[in-house]
Amino acid sequence: MNIDLTKKLEKHNLFVKSAGDHGEKLVLDEFDLRELNFYNIDLSESMLIDCNLEDIKVDNVDFYGAELYSSSFQNSIITQSGFVKAKADYTSFRNTKIYETNFSKADLMEVDFSSTIIQDSGFVFSNLYKADFSNSELTNVDFESVFLEETLFNHTKLSSLLNLEKALIRSINIGTADNPVILAEKTAEKWLKENSNL
């Protein structure tokens, strides 16, 4: 890992611990972060815009309130981490394995979760407008107060979606992005319940 990035991380750690009084917020744009050891680190409030986080292991990392717009976690393994209040619109988690991870109150508009395995995780109060879960497997995932509109569930395997009755469902798309099949509100909720093995 390069010396400059190490110094930036040290400054960010001080920034987090001092609640912004000391140190400096980590701000990276179009940066390759694949050499970073993503184990037990606090990246709260960081700005990682259009960064490469592909093919890595993310374990016990806190992205609370982080700005992750257009970054890519493709082909990664994410475990026991937090994306609470993260701003992650247009981010890619394609072909990623996600376990015991919290996406509560996160902005996840048009996020790519396709071909992803998500287990024992939560999207409570998160915004999943036009997010793509096609060809994914969701098991024991909490959808309490989640916002769904044109959210893509094509060939998605659902098992034990929790608190679905408390979700705000405008619509879902069970077709494709190019050939949408839109189900609205109660019809969408019924489809999700019928296709989730509760």
Image: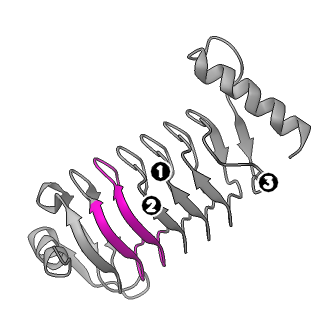
Name the residue rendered at 33%, 50% in the picture: 126
Tell me which numbered mark, 2 or 1, is placed earlier along the sequence.
Answer: 1
Q: Which residue is mark 3?
A: 35
Q: Nearer the viewer, residue 49 or 12?
A: 12
Residue 16 placed where, x, y %? 60, 23
Residue 90 seen in render: no
Q: Is 168 situated above or below 18?
A: below
Residue 124 counted in the magenta span: yes
Per the rendering, the mark at residue 120 is: none
Q: Which residue is mark 1?
A: 80
Provide the residue span drawn in magenta. Answer: 113-141
Q: Residues within 10 Å of mark 3 (few under 14, many from 20)?
A: few
- Under circle 2, the secondary element is strand
Residue 42 placed where, x, y %? 59, 35
Q: Which kind of residue does numbered mark 3 sit on? A: Glu
Query: Among all residues in the image, which is located at the extreme top?
Result: 21
Q: CA distance from mark 3 to mark 2?
A: 22 Å
Tell me which numbered mark, 3 or 1, is placed earlier along the sequence.
Answer: 3
Determine whether label 2 and label 1 are within 8 Å by CB. Answer: yes
Residue 74 placed where, x, y %? 61, 68
Residue 157 placed where, x, y %? 32, 81
Of tags 3 and 1, the one toward the viewer is 1
Q: Nearer the viewer, residue 112 or 18?
A: 18
Q: Residues within 10 Å of mark 1 (few under 14, many from 20)?
A: some
Q: CA distance from mark 3 to mark 1?
A: 20 Å
